[in-house]
Image: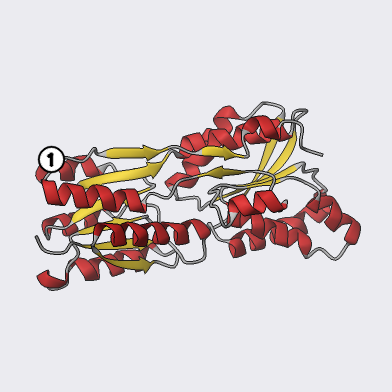
Amino acid sequence: MKRLRFLVSLITKENDYQLEQAAAAQQASHRLGTDLDILYADNDAITQSTQILKAVQAAPESRPDAVVFEPAGGTALPQVARAAVTAGIGWVVLNREADYLTELRRSSRLPIFAISSDHIAIGQIQAQQFAALLPRGGSILYIQGPSENSAAKDRTAGMQKSLPSNIQVIALRGQWTEESAYKSVTSWLKLNLLHRVSIHLIGAQNDVMAVGARKAFLDLTNVDEREQWLRLPFTGVDGLPKTGQTWVRTGSLKATVIVPPNTGQALTMLSEAIKTGSTVPERTSTIPSSFPPLEKLTGQAP
């Protein structure tokens, strides 16, 4: 059998989880003995669509056997998916709902499936962390991912579902990057000078946005105000060993949610399905967990 070739399309290089997704794919590809191309969409759905279509429409000998991608925009590229399957290319969606998968699976024997983190569960764990850190309630500044992103929507829905009624949320938007959260919080701080809203915790839907928020407070010129903000607990999501978990251990973050990368699992499932002709489940979920465990967070808030 010929050596398999996979294309992995990720959202951005400016995000530690996306870089961990790339590393997991490289490790799996090396273990499986496959060829691998990794592309980044720079947070742009049109760029991502163009990059994947170029690979799909290449000469048959240059095409990947399957595309694994994490959507950069609001949709999971249904037209590109159909073009790939028509060209005999397998299709895997990461961390996004894609209703068209059922239809494609009915009309093709190719491996076509989705692997996602359980984003509702991630939001619920964050809410439990907020409750543990703020047992008497309070207000949180909550930095969400892009408004059109289903992972961000699901994390928010899970958080709202499990959040105690004595905790209020002020929501800001980011783009999964440190810089976007820095800009969002900096703009909010300028407005907050007029209203002086009391905040007791800063929570972000990923770790790098939590760090970006922290840097915005570090740049405050008023020393007393800066120290007051920096004494608050900061929390995030992704919990990678070299970033989120390290930031918790060193005190930059109070807590994070560990979200296992899923590109390696996707490549393993693809390789097995292509080589053996086995059927792959349409949807598979990975399981998040709190770091540190929730019982260790209780009562840690100032």
Residue in the picture at 25% in, 47% down: 269
- Name which residue lies at 56% across and 51% down: 206
Q: Is residue 34 above or below residue 75?
A: below
> Residue reaching furthest top?
165
Which quadrant is the C terminus positioned in?
top right
With 245 as the anchor, is 118 left or right in this view? left
Please identify the quarter of the rendering in which residue 297 is found. Answer: top right
Residue at 85% across, 55% down? 227
Q: Residues within 10 Å of mark 1 (few under 14, many from 20)?
A: few
Q: How is the image coloured?
A: secondary structure
Element type at marker 1? helix
Residue 176 in the image: state x and y as whole percent: 53, 57
Task: Quadrant for the N terminus, please.
Answer: bottom left
Return the residue nearer the eye: 29 or 157.
29
The picture quadrant where one finds residue 142 is top right
270 or 121: nearer the eye? 270
Toward the viewer: 289 or 206?
Answer: 289
- Front one among 27 and 235: 27
Q: Is residue 243 left or right of residue 276?
A: right
Can residue 117 be seen here? The reply is yes
Q: Amino acid at mark 1?
A: Arg
Residue 75 shows in this picture:
no
Instruction: Count the numbered circles shown.
Output: 1
Expressed as whole percent of the image width and height from the top left, the position of residue 143 reads 61, 49
Q: Is residue 270 left or right of residue 144?
A: left
- Image location of residue 29, percent across then percent down: 29, 60
Which residue does the image show at 53% across and 37% down from the upper left?
289
x and y percentages locating residue 109 in the rendered image: 10, 46
Q: Which residue is mark 1?
A: 106
